[in-house]
């Protein structure tokens, strides 16, 4: 059952189109991330849901009510800002209770809800503190509580963690996700950090230059990227040009070596130039006798990244990254050695630009 | 502080006749200058006010005489009155003007124009300003002429330029620009997100003002008004040039005392001057404290 | 801002513009009325051709230039040493530079006259006292300008680089530091210029020739000539501050203590 619908949304600022052809249906309780680089239009789209920007075309429908033209203070959506935006002249408790006070709810109800929220974000002792006395992470949690206290229908988060340290970011994003699940509230989360989006979303909308590139679950986005942009933005990727040899048998050639892919090539013809991609973790050293997709390579560089060991290999004229799990008892090849690597047919992705 | 740490190293790292002593030599002219031409003359005011002008003995009598002199108390009262009025009036008007230009939805060139004009206007005080208003509103003034031509002569309705109220109007000319200049950074500091957050939580424009913007700006507004108060309290040349010294302000009395001992008692003059300095010091302190509070919130 | 709010903004702006420009307009019109019934620049002619105007105006120029020079000579080394070597006196120095705000000009001249009209410092009649007093008046602005300028350049590194190349302190101050804070000094200088040119109290009570006391004197004597002077005064202030804006790239002009 669709809770929030964005239909044919586009936005123009003095001649420049910042968002175009945005269509999305969000289910109740779903956690959707808008993922993309700076300037891709994700924040603008979020602000159109909140009412701070008015779409040039299209409709925003929340719970079957069209809210496209409604003023931001009439929408009952809760927003968490990147810069927290806590009111500095009010205590934590007063900040959290602000929305309810505006709606003239009785003091007793406000007190109860504030206590409930403080417990939810684990800051029970901080009710009387001022925002300037809290750390960045604590302030962001208060901002979250303030947005939730008002019982909004949708929770909007605009890069809430980008101003925080890496460790706090990881902890806080898990906390946000768990609170969202507990309350069952629909959430839209804007971020440029693909790891963040992958780890907490039900679905991800990858955006670039105002356009939706792909919508899907984290699994789908990562493993089956549909465009070159998505493939390169999400995770690391080895890409190269290839030529189609036989569309029916799904054979292609890179640099004189023949590869077999599992993707459909029926719409291509022999000789077509295409772009393919292989995830680093899908390349393995050849351990048993294999006939398909065996590539000769030279070891260029080995980088120890902790749990992952990244090996740079040269295959023909291409430099590829190969990721393998750290195993202290497994001997790694020497730099300059000639080895053979392989990948499955399914690992060879054909990109549509 | 890094410099402090390095300085601790400096004496060890360099020979005894280190550049350390050069530095002190470098600031001696400043301290000498400040002492001779600022601190010492100012302190003679303080010391002079505690000395009986006849017996040259230490006394509090000068202040007692001050407090019992109805003329002087009147001068203080009038100075305070005009300062209160122009700081409130200039403060409110200046604030409205600043907010209109910065957050009021006006084209952005209005803001920089306003800042420039205010910079000039707040400096355009003293003799030329007095004359400008004479040219405008004296019985032979330009505006008086226009209004009379339109059928309304302000002088027939009780208006007088060379009075307390006339002077107030003139004072406002440099008060409200000062307000604009000082409060502008504070208004800038009102983050757009606060407005959006409050809208998002359901607040109307009025509620945003009442619960968020105004409380945040209040220390700055108050502090600047106090600054305006001090500014007006210490003003002299404008009043002198406009009224020829006929208005009883503390600064005018001090001026008269300088020209010839009108009070008949040198010690009293000193006491008067010291009283002024105290008022100014309190004003500047109040302003500084309130500004610090503002900075804490608008960081 | 809601649409209704913008109307209010325009309203306040219009009021402000009116209040600001009417007196200036009146002064200008007044200055053109020297010849009955005709708008002319006679008042300007009258004033500019008198020897008294030239004398007084030139003296003010002289005081202003001297004040700026003395200011640079005293404040630049001080600000430099405080920043480089003596951070512990910083608070004392900043307090001193704020003192002129606490002591209004009329009280200041009161103290100056009393102090310096008796031995051992009988210099109340000396122009040096006036220049010194003006330097004190300009101190908050001059010192702060210079200090801001120094803050923007890496004083320590520049000094050490110059030292490693063999420069002595004089060279460092005047050929390395000074050129790099030129903009800040200019800002402070033009502000001081505007202050001194418009200053009335000190010049009047220390009995020295200057522009503002001359204007005050003329108000008693003539009707239209003072208007010409007022217009000139305003133009001068505007020009000084305008140059600061251009030179200082829009750093906010501060309020002046001396003139009123």
Image (spheres, rainbow, N blue to C red):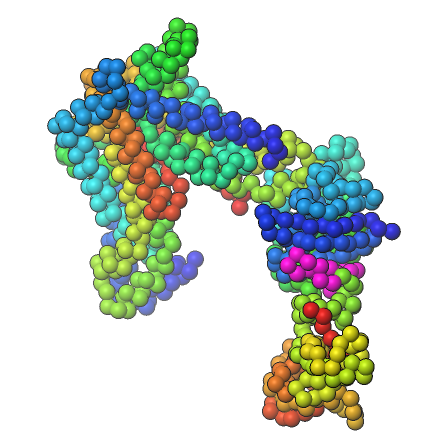
Asked if residue C195 is positioned above or below residue A134 in the image, the reply reads above
Is residue A145 something that shows in the picture? no
Q: Position of residue B108 (x, y in %)?
A: 49, 40
Position of residue B2 measured from the top left corner of the image (x, y, whole percent) = 42, 60
Residue located at (27% from left, 26% from top): C230
Q: Where is residue C25 in the image (x, y as percent from the top left)?
A: 34, 24
| Residue A333: % across, % down | 66, 90
Q: What residue is drawn where x is 72% and y is 70%?
A: A352
One can see residue B123 in this view: yes
Q: Is residue C142 left or right of residue B1?
A: left
Quarter of the picture containing the N terminus of chain C is top right
Quarter holding residue C93 = top left
Residue B174, by quadrant, is top left
Magenta stretch holds residue C152: no
Q: Which residue lies furthest to the left in this view?
A: C51
Foreground pick, B259 / C248: C248
Up-down relation of residue A324 to residue A210 (above or below): below
Residue A11 placement, left or right of A187: left
The image shows residue C216, relative to residue C161, as above or below, that is: above
Extreme-right residue of the structure:
A1
- Front in this rendered view, residue A276 or A88: A276
Q: Which residue is drawn at 19% across and 17% down?
A: C221
Closer to the camera, B23 or B184?
A: B184
Task: Say whether residue A107 is left or right of residue A210.
Answer: right
Q: In the image, which residues are magenta?
A: A197-214
Q: On the rendered image, what quadrant is the C terminus of chain C found in?
A: top left
């Amino acid at each position: 059952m669709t809770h929030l619908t964005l239909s044919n949304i586009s936005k123009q600022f003095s001649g420049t189109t910042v968002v175009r052809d945005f269509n999305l249906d969000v289910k109740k309780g779903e956690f959707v991330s808008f993922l993309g680089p700076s300037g891709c239009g994700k924040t603008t789209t979020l602000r159109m849901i909140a009412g701070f920007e008015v779409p040039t075309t299209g409709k925003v429908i929340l719970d079957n009510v069209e809210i496209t033209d409604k003023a931001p203070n009439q929408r009952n959506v809760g927003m968490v800002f990147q810069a927290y935006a806590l009111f500095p002249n009010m205590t934590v408790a007063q900040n959290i209770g602000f929305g309810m006070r505006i709606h003239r709810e009785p003091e007793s109800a406000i007190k109860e809800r504030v206590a409930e929220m403080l417990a939810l974000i684990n800051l029970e002792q901080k009710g009387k503190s001022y925002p300037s006395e809290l750390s960045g992470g604590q302030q962001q949690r208060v901002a979250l509580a303030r947005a939730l206290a008002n019982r909004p229908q949708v929770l909007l988060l605009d890069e809430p963690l980008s101003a925080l340290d890496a460790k706090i970011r990881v902890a806080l994003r898990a906390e946000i996700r768990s609170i969202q699940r507990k309350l069952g509230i629909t959430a839209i989360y804007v971020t440029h950090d693909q790891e963040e989006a992958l780890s907490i979303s039900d679905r991800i909308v990858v955006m670039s230059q105002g356009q939706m590139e792909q919508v899907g679950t984290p699994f789908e986005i990562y493993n089956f990227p549909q465009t070159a942009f998505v493939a390169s933005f999400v995770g690391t990727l080895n890409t190269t040009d290839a030529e189609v040899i036989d569309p029916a048998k799904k054979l292609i050639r890179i640099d004189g070596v023949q590869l077999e892919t599992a993707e459909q090539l029926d719409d291509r013809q022999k000789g077509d130039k295409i772009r393919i991609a292989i995830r680093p973790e899908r390349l393995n050293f050849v351990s048993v006798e294999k006939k398909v997709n065996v590539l000769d390579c030279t070891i260029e560089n080995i980088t120890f990244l902790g749990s992952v060991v990244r090996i740079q290999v040269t295959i023909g004229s291409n430099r590829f990254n190969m990721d393998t799990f750290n195993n202290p008892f497994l001997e790694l090849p020497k730099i300059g050695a000639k080895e053979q690597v392989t990948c499955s047919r399914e690992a060879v992705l054909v990109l549509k630009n | 502080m890094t410099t402090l740490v390095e300085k601790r190293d400096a004496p060890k790292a360099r020979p005894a006749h280190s550049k350390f002593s050069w530095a002190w030599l470098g600031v001696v002219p400043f301290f000498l200058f400040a002492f001779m031409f600022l601190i010492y003359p100012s302190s003679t005011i303080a010391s002079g006010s505690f000395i009986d002008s006849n017996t040259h003995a230490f006394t509090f009598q000068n202040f007692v005489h001050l407090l019992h002199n109805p003329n002087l108390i009147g001068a203080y009262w009038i100075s305070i009155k005009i300062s209160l009025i122009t700081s409130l009036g200039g403060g409110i008007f200046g604030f409205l003007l600043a907010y209109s230009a910065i957050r009021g939805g006006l084209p952005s060139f209005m803001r920089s124009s306003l800042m420039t004009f205010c910079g000039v206007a707040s400096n355009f005080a003293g003799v030329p300003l007095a004359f400008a208003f004479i040219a405008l509103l004296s019985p032979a003034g330009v505006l008086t002429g226009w209004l009379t031509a339109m059928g309304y002569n302000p002088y027939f309705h009780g208006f007088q330029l060379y009075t307390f109220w006339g002077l107030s109007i003139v004072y406002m000319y440099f008060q409200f620009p000062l307000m604009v200049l000082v409060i502008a950074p504070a208004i800038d500091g009102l983050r757009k997100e606060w407005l959006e957050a409050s809208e998002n939580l359901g607040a109307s424009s009025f509620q945003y003002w009442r619960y968020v913007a105004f409380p945040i700006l209040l220390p700055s507004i108050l502090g600047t008004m106090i600054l305006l108060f001090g500014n007006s309290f210490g003003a002299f040349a404008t009043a002198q040039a406009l009224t020829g010294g006929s208005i009883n302000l503390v600064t005018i009395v001090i001026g008269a005392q300088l020209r010839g001992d009108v009070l008949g008692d040198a010690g009293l003059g000193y006491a008067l001057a010291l009283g002024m300095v105290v008022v100014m010091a309190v004003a500047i302190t109040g302003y500084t404290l309130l500004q610090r509070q503002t900075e804490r919130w608008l960081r | 801002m809601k649409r209704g709010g913008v109307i209010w903004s325009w309203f306040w702006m219009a009021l402000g513009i009116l209040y600001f420009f009417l007196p200036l307009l009146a002064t200008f019109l007044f200055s053109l009325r020297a010849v009955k019934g005709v708008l002319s620049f006679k008042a300007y002619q009258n004033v500019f051709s008198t020897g008294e105007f030239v004398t007084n105006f030139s003296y003010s120029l002289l005081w202003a230039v001297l004040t700026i020079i003395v200011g640079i000579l005293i404040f630049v080394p001080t600000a430099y040493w405080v920043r480089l070597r003596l951070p512990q006196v910083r608070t004392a120095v900043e307090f001193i530079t704020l003192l002129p705000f606490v002591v209004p000009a009329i009280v200041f001249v009161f103290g100056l006259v009393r102090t310096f009209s008796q031995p051992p410092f009988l210099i109340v009649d000396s122009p040096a006292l006036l220049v010194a007093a003006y330097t004190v008046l300009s101190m908050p602005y001059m010192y702060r300008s210079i200090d801001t300028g120094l803050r923007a350049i890496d004083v320590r590194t520049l000094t050490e680089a110059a030292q490693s190349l063999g420069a002595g302190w004089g060279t460092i101050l005047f050929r390395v530091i000074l050129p790099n804070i030129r903009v800040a000094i200019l800002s402070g200088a033009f502000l001081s210029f505007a202050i001194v040119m418009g200053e009335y109290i000190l010049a009047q009570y220390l009995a020295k020739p200057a522009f503002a006391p001359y204007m005050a004197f003329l108000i008693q004597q003539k009707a239209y000539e003072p208007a010409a002077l007022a217009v000139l005064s305003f133009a001068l202030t505007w020009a000084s501050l305008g140059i600061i804006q251009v030179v200082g790239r829009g750093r906010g002009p501060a309020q002046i203590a001396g003139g009123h």
